[in-house]
Image (cartoon, rainbow, N blue to C red):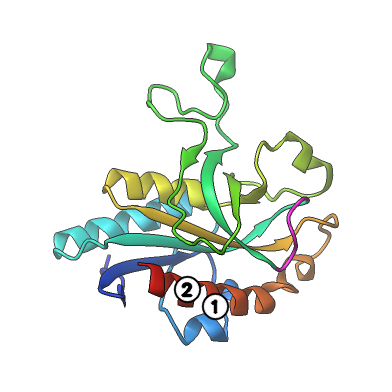
Amino acid sequence: MKAPALETFNGHSVLFIMAVPAEYGKELKARITPLICGVGPVEAALTTGRALLALEHEGHKPDFIVSLGSAGSYILEQGEVYQAKSVSYRDMDASPLGFTKGVTPFLDHEVHLPILCPLKNVAKASLSTGGNIISGTAYEAVEADMVDMETFAVKRAADTFEIPLIGLRGISDGKQELSKYGDWADYLEDIDGKLAKVLDGLYEVL
């Protein structure tokens, strides 16, 4: 795999990661060139791990990784951007064997992995990652403020290479039960602009 492009943010090298091109609108295109990792924890882990290995091989390991894009929530404001203060893995449940739900067996990690939150003016929220789209009453079983399908995988890869992770998510859906593609996509243009403004603030902070 060819090493992805890194951005220089106020003297620091940063790898930006997004799931799909649909989340990468004109405002973000004017600022960054992200690694597109694909949908779900498997694709995100594979793509991120390969990219970081390629960067390490070239001697260009980033100072920070920023995972950004959309998320769902039935309690947070749709269209607003939040910093992920922690991320958990909702798919992992080996509790019938005595392991804590959310903890990968034989790995020593917390249920809610903490994430760096450097922006004072951006609200913080907990995040849950899994391989399914959450909608309607399914939110009741999720122990987090918002949900996505990639950040936990990116966090595990970042930790493996000892790189700090920042997670930024715009809420695209959750107030209404999803029934079609547009229920998710309608907010993406607005989220693109707000994520871009948050990145402008991040540039000043790093």
Q: Which residues are magenta?
A: 75-79
Residue drawn at (40%, 78%), measured in percent from left and top? 33
Tell whether 112 sits left or right of 183.
left
In this figure, which residue is indicated by the disc labeled 1? 197
Task: Please check the rendered image and state whether residue 78 is part of the magenta-colored stretch, yes or no.
Answer: yes
In this figure, which residue is indicated by the disc labeled 2? 201
- Where is residue 45? Give x, y as percent: 41, 50
Q: CA distance from mark 1 to mark 2?
A: 7 Å
Q: Tell me, yes or no, if residue 22 can be seen here.
A: yes
User: Residue flagged by tag 1: what amino acid is it?
Assistant: Lys
Q: Residues within 10 Å of mark 1 (few under 14, many from 20)?
A: some
Tell me whether circle 1 and circle 2 mark residues in contact (CB < 8 Å).
yes
Task: Please check the rendered image and state whether residue 154 is part of the magenta-colored stretch, yes or no.
Answer: no
Question: In the picture, which quadrant includes the N terminus?
Answer: bottom left
Give the camera-side residue of 157 and 111: 111
User: Residue flagged by tag 2: what amino acid is it?
Assistant: Gly
Give the overall secondary structure of the magenta segment. Answer: loop
Q: Which mark is residue 31?
A: none
Tell whether 57 sits left or right of 117.
left
Question: In the picture, which quadrant includes the C terminus?
Answer: bottom left
Residue drawn at (49%, 27%), measured in percent from left and top? 103
Q: In the displayed structure, would residue 176 be above or below residue 98?
A: below
- Disc 1, SS: helix
Tell whether 117 sits left or right of 169.
left
